[in-house]
Image (cartoon, coloured by chain):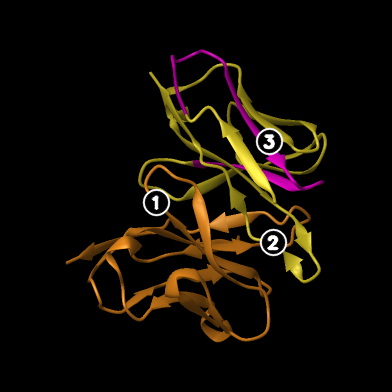
């Protein structure tokens, strides 16, 4: 069955430090890949997406992610974290099943310390 | 531009009462529509998705149902709520593009508390 794994439930980084959030997926073909961010009590906002082509994709707010087919991974990175980046981050996979249903990982809560 | 409206924002309902959550999309036609539930401390669970009027796919068997009476309207219902139905419900839409599948666009969610 298709699945998305985010192995880190929560991560704490210092402001200004670099960040990497891990995501692995299980799917027979190359899926459409996404990272979303959710602030408390809000809906989800798209950070970036990968459909095809260049495996390093740039997103909003200075985030980037790299698709590695051999590792079935799509890790999210940011070189310098800001306090406003504290939120929950979700990796997602869209499957071409007619309705293009999207499956989400369990999320990683990011805490930023001063 | 496209917008998605979801209401109510918060809802407190007693066990055994009915439920109706509504979601509408403006500025697009024939969208794919989705209902997700997010339990406290957990990821998003896909409940239903729809590719057209009257076409509903259920992902999780439970006491919830969904309907799509109009192209841009998606309704989540229950005849009798359970305590376990408490959670944060999110409506979303997407569409097919020339290069594949668009990202999901989410509403602001409904916080449901069943007491």
Against B89, residue A108 (above or below) is below
Tell me where residue B34 sits by quadrant: top right
Residue A77 shown left or right of residue A82 in the figure: right
Letter of the chain that mark 1 sits on in the rendering: A
Q: Is residue A10 visible?
A: no
Image coords of residue B5 (percent x, y): 61, 37
Q: Nearer the viewer, residue B11 or A85?
A: A85
Task: Name the residue tied to disc 1.
Answer: A39
Disc 1 element: loop
Q: Disc 1 and disc 2: Cα gap in Å?
A: 22 Å
Camera-side residue of B52 and B62:
B52
* Residue indicated by mark 2: B102
The crowd level at tag 2 (other Cα within 10 Å; few <14, some 14-19, many 20+) is some
Report the side of A37 relative to A9 (left or right): right
Indicate the secondary structure of the residue bearing disc 3. Answer: strand
Q: Residue A79, relative to residue A4: is it above or below? A: below
Query: Are the residues flagged by discs 3 and 1 from a single subunit?
Result: no
């Amino acid at each position: 069955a298709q699945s998305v794994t985010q192995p880190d439930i929560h991560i704490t980084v210092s402001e200004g430090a670099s960040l990497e959030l891990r995501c692995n997926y299980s799917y027979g073909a190359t899926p459409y890949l996404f990272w979303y961010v959710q602030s408390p009590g809000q809906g989800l906002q798209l950070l970036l997406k990968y459909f095809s082509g260049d495996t390093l994709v740039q997103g909003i707010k200075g985030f980037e992610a790299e698709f590695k087919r051999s590792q079935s991974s799509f890790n999210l990175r940011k070189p310098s974290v800001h306090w406003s980046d504290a939120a929950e981050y979700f990796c997602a996979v869209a499957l071409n099943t007619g309705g293009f249903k999207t499956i989400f990982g369990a999320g990683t809560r990011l805490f930023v310390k001063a | 531009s496209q917008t998605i409206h979801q209401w109510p924002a918060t809802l407190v309902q007693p066990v055994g009462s009915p439920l109706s959550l509504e979601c509408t999309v403006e500025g697009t036609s024939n969208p794919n529509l989705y209902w997700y539930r997010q339990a406290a401390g957990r990821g998003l669970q896909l409940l239903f998705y729809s590719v057209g009027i009257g076409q509903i796919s259920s992902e999780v068997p439970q006491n919830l149902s969904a309907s799509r009476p109009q192209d841009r309207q998606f309704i989540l219902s229950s005849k009798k709520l359970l305590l376990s139905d408490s959670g944060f419900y999110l409506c979303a839409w997407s569409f097919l593009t020339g290069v594949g599948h668009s990202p999901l666009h989410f509403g602001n969610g409904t916080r449901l508390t069943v007491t």
